[in-house]
Image (spheres, helix red, strand yellow):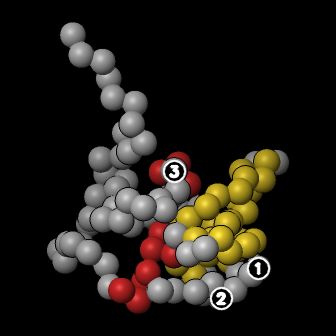
């Protein structure tokens, strides 16, 4: 009998699937996106890019950019009373429009 996988992307069959007809890699401008400190961003995981992907439980959450670390950004997200810090690359972030 085999053991169940406990990997990083388990139980994400529908969450991390490409829903558009145009599948494949993302445009380069998405990787080069820049965000200002204090800016609100949405976490929208890009399944074709594994590097710098936050945990799938944060998919769809909105956070504030706190700091930049190399190519990545540190976000602060509130879950109930707790504040969590998440590191993510710009491929997995979208700026919030007012």
Can you say whether 92 is above or below 34 in the image? above
Query: Please, what secondary structure does the residue beneath circle 2 have?
Result: loop
Residue picked out by circle 3: 55
Residue picked out by circle 2: 98
Residue 51 visible here: yes
Tag in front: 2 or 1? 1
Quarter holding the N terminus is: top left
- Residue 33 versus residue 56: which sits nearer the camera? 33
Q: Residue, x 40% and y 30% (percent of image)?
A: 6
Q: Residue, x 26% and y 75% (percent of image)?
A: 25
Can you say whether 84 is above or below 67 in the image? above
Residue picked out by circle 1: 38
Residue 5 in the image: x percent, y percent?
A: 33, 29
Would you say 52 lies left or right of 13 here?
right
Residue sitting farthest toward the front = 70
Would you say 51 lies left or right of 3 here?
right
N-term-proximal mark, 2 vs 1: 1
How many C-alpha atoms fall within 10 Å of the one at disc 1: few (<14), some, or many (≥20)? few
N-term-proximal mark, 1 vs 3: 1
Residue 86 in the image: x percent, y percent?
A: 64, 58
Would you say 53 lies left or right of 69 here?
left
Residue 42 visible here: no
């Amino acid at each position: 009998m085999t053991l169940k996988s406990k990997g990083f992307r388990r139980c994400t069959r529908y969450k991390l699937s490409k829903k558009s007809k145009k599948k494949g890699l993302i445009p380069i401008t998405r990787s080069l996106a820049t965000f200002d400190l204090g800016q609100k961003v949405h976490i929208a995981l890009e399944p074709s890019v594994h590097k710098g992907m936050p945990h799938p439980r944060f998919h769809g959450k909105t956070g504030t950019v706190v700091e930049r670390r190399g190519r990545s950004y540190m976000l602060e997200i509130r879950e109930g009373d707790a504040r969590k810090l998440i590191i993510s690359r710009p491929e997995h972030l979208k700026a919030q429009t007012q």
